[in-house]
Amino acid sequence: MVRWVDGTPMTLTDDQEYVPSRRSFFFLRNWFHVSQPWRAACAGAGLLTLGAFVEAAEARGCRVARGRTVQAWRTTVELAGQPEVLYIKCYHYASRPFSYWARASRAWREARNYLTFARLGIPGPELVAVGEERRGYGLQRALIVTREVPDTRNLEDALETPEFRTQAALRCRILEQAATLAGRAHQQRFYHRDLKVRNLLVQGFPSPDCRLFWIDCPLGGFYWLGGAHLASADVEDMGKSLRRVVLPEEWAAFRRAYAAARSAPLNRPNAPTQRQRA
């Protein structure tokens, strides 16, 4: 059983969101999960299968990313009479299906981590759906659907704006949040493992009250060994871009805020969203 840092077991209650446990992948071939708040709306729109979401993305969506094994679309879908902007990411593994033989896909791990963000107090996208298609035990396709975080822009783009370069209060706000979120996660031994500024969204920019969100986290998780190295890697991933555009004393303040967040008294959530294994 996985435990929080203070030794309290992670438990799962009936009213909490659930993604199939890693153990299930030794027995399941195909599965698809729609988050409870979205279930009725997706059923009304006929979006209850992996294929239905992919068809909707290809028909109405705008492709925002395309790689050797992954495609992502930004799609507006009518759900319960309201237009909702969704990001649909689909992994294709038909050419090498046994690379994920009897183990979780990146889509599953990313969905698991978004649910974990909420329990750790880290803002992240709202999970809509996640699923896998397998043939035998070889993975064919995996899909994750999230709701767009409104009024956001990529922090990598925000760093290049005149507002960021000229407004000291704005830089301090963003640096403080980036340090606090990373320290809070590392305090619980959760590591993003790809915490580049392109995987941070800033909401309300360039307002001084802007807010950071973590996204795109298929590699992250709880790790009980090598924590110092993983924490250093997360901070360095952010620092590569941030140090180019902030003053040395501001980066020093970032390091102090990170150390303070990581050493603060543990504020464990009452109950996590799901079980996770290191």
Image: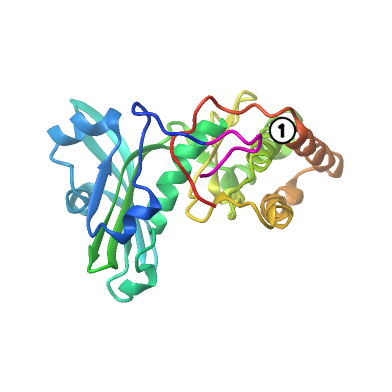
Q: Specify whether residue 121 is painted magenta.
A: no
Q: Position of residue 55 (x, y in %)?
A: 18, 53
Residue 204 seen by the camera: yes
Under mark 1, the amino acid is Glu
* In front of the other: 154 or 11: 11
Chain part drawn in magenta: 1-9
Find residue 17 and report its image quarter: top left
Q: In this view, does 111 lie above or below 119?
A: below
For this view, does 74 lie left or right of residue 275? left
Q: Where is residue 50 in the image (x, y as percent from the top left)?
A: 22, 51
Find residue 230 and report its image quarter: bottom right
Q: Specify whether residue 6 is painted magenta.
A: yes
Residue at the disc numbered 1? 176
From the image, give the main secondary structure of the stretch colored magenta: loop
* In front of the other: 230 or 202: 230
Find residue 44 and report its image quarter: top left
